[in-house]
Amino acid sequence: MKRAGRLLFAVVPLFAVAACFVVPGHGDDSARPDGRSATPDVRAAGLDSPEKKELAQRIVSSAENSSLDWRAQYDYIEDIDDGRGYTAGIIGFTTGTHDLLVLVERYTKSHPDNRLARYLPALRKVDGSESHEGLGAAFVAAWKAEARKPVFQRAQDSERDRVYFDPAVRLARRDGLGTLGQFIYYDAMVMHGPGSDPGFYGIRERAVAQADTPAEGGDEKAYLDIFLDVRRGTMKDEKRDTTRVDTAQRRFLYDGNLDLATPLKWKVYGQSYELK
């Protein structure tokens, strides 16, 4: 039997509980003659609505760059000593985990004269390692220079969406998750990558082995609590700071904010953030 989450929710009046389980078009007075609800579904838009997507980028940036200004990160690049070589750009593409290489390859295919193209042989050579061989200060300077171009900024946006954002939101929707759950999947995809284990898909596989997703009839809050448990364990195994789970995502969840509605307050690495 899959275990239940450890969330403890406040006791609420019975009529309030019942109201939470009214399905539009199935016995509620707001249903229209065509079977559709006259009341808008506030969760229908999800994380890929423009407003929520912007919100997601800012929250991720607070953890990845200690800043809410995610657009200021296109030219970011440094080795943060995590065994992945250089970390760069708006989503932390790395030279050691293939995604930075793919970004430069795809960008070079459409813009062959860019400053980063000459480093493709070196990027292929160091892929899968923390090595800087063939890169170094010259590569860092080339990245920063190229990142000033709107066309390379759009390339970063596109690769973020293709590899991380779109797959995370799509799978979260299949699992029956609302906006917060879609964000939790997305942030895990960003940090751990779309690998099997300890990547995002491995984390999800271990979570669904312990709890039913909402699509399987499980409780959404309980499932997300267990997903965060599993992810936190992975982060601890990798000796990573867990505050983006402990004092950000877990806080949203325990507040019952499944729509990721503003205002939001959270902490990452002890720094406080607020979005109104």
Image (cartoon, rainbow, N blue to C red):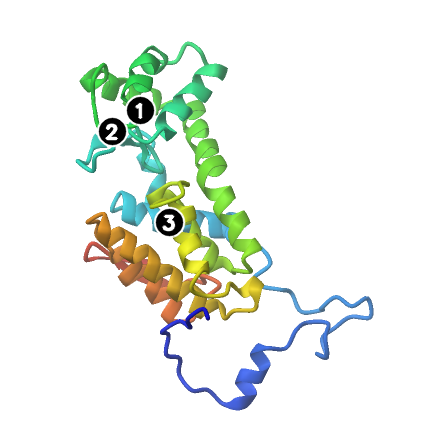
* Residue 188 numbered mark, or none: 3
Label 2 and label 1: CA atoms lie apart by 11 Å
Check the image and report above or below for 232 versus 38.
above
Query: Which quarter of the image is occupied by the C terminus?
Result: bottom left
Of labels 2 and 1, earlier in sequence is: 2
- Which residue does the image show at 73% across and 72% down from the upper left? 25
Q: Is residue 199 left or right of residue 163?
A: left
Closer mark to the observer between disc 3 and disc 1: 1
Q: Looking at the rendered structure, which numbered label has been put on residue 69? A: none
Residue 87 in view: yes
Disc 2 to disc 3, how far (Cα)? Answer: 20 Å
* Earlier sequence position, callout 2 versus callout 3: 2
- Residue occupying the far front of the picture: 1
Q: What type is the residue that disc 1 sits on? A: Asp
Residue at image position (70%, 78%) is 28
User: Where is 228 relative to 113, above or below?
Assistant: below
Q: Badge 2 is on which residue?
A: 86
- Residue 72's image quarter? top left
Q: Position of residue 215 (x, y in %)?
A: 57, 62
